[in-house]
Amino acid sequence: MNNLHMNGGLIDNGSNGGKTINLSGKSLILDSGTIRSGNAAAKTCLFQNGNMTGSGTINITGQGTSDVGAEIEFASSMITTNFTGIFNIYNYGQLNLVAIATNKASFGLTISGSGQLNNDANIALTSLTLGADVIGNGAYTAADLVGINAGYAAYFTNAADDTLTITVIPEPATLGMIVASASLLLAVRRMVV
């Protein structure tokens, strides 16, 4: 396989059995589009052995009208640090991500409606939106987030989990603006004193 470039369109697992997309060291370029899981628990779509890049919004959705347990999964062999966009999980979509260290955070998540995060690894994100609520920077377990708002339980397959940590950190550009603003404030303060 050559690089797989999503710029609109749909990757759909349909009613097929589970699907594994082995990128064999190539790139999965995510600029826009939808990845949809299958219509039963065994119909997960797994991406492996590749480099995730791009800066778009990628919709993660499911099939049917109830939580059927199929998910979109990125294996530990996927490099995620070059994707700087957003995964938008809704309409019975479930996403399972590889572990992401805080110094490797590069993209954000939006979970709404019947979308769910089905993770068993700690992840770091540049942004997290649950429903209409933007979650502030910090480290949270699913249980912590549900403690903030009981309605958030719907966005996690295991809302009582107190071991999985989701860390939200500012994007590097935002962090740079914070540092620049602080430096400017300090310079102005020195001029006034």
Image (tube, rainbow, N blue to C red):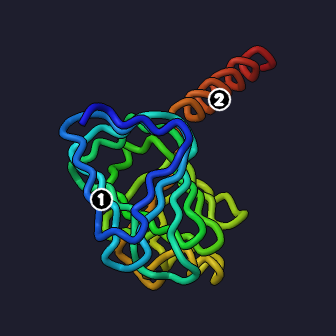
Q: What element carries label 2?
A: helix
Tell me the kind of residue under disc 1: Leu
Are discs 2 and 1 less than 8 Å apart at CB?
Answer: no
Identify the residue at image location x=44%, y=62%: 166
Q: Which mark is residue 176?
A: none
Query: Hey, which quadrant is residue 51 in on the image?
Result: top left
Q: Is mark 1 on a helix, strand or loop?
A: strand
Residue for badge 2: 182
Look at the picture and state if 32 lies above or below 144: above
- Residue ranking furthest to the right: 192
Residue for badge 1: 46
- Residue ranking furthest to the front: 15
Rendered location of residue 27, percent (x, y)? 31, 34
Q: Nearer the viewer, residue 48 or 98?
A: 48
Identify the residue at image location x=38%, y=57%: 123
Q: How many residues crowd around disc 2 within 10 Å: few (fewer than 14), some, or many (20 or more)?
A: few
Rendered location of residue 5, percent (x, y)? 42, 35
Q: Which of 84 and 53 is in front in this view?
A: 53
- Lower position in the chain sequence, tag 2 or tag 1: 1
Q: How many residues crowd around disc 1 within 10 Å: few (fewer than 14), some, or many (20 or more)?
A: some
Name the front one of labels 2 and 1: 1
User: In this image, 98 relative to 142: left or right?
Assistant: left
Rendered location of residue 42, percent (x, y)? 31, 76
Q: Nearer the viewer, residue 169 or 78?
A: 78
Rendered location of residue 76, percent (x, y)? 23, 53
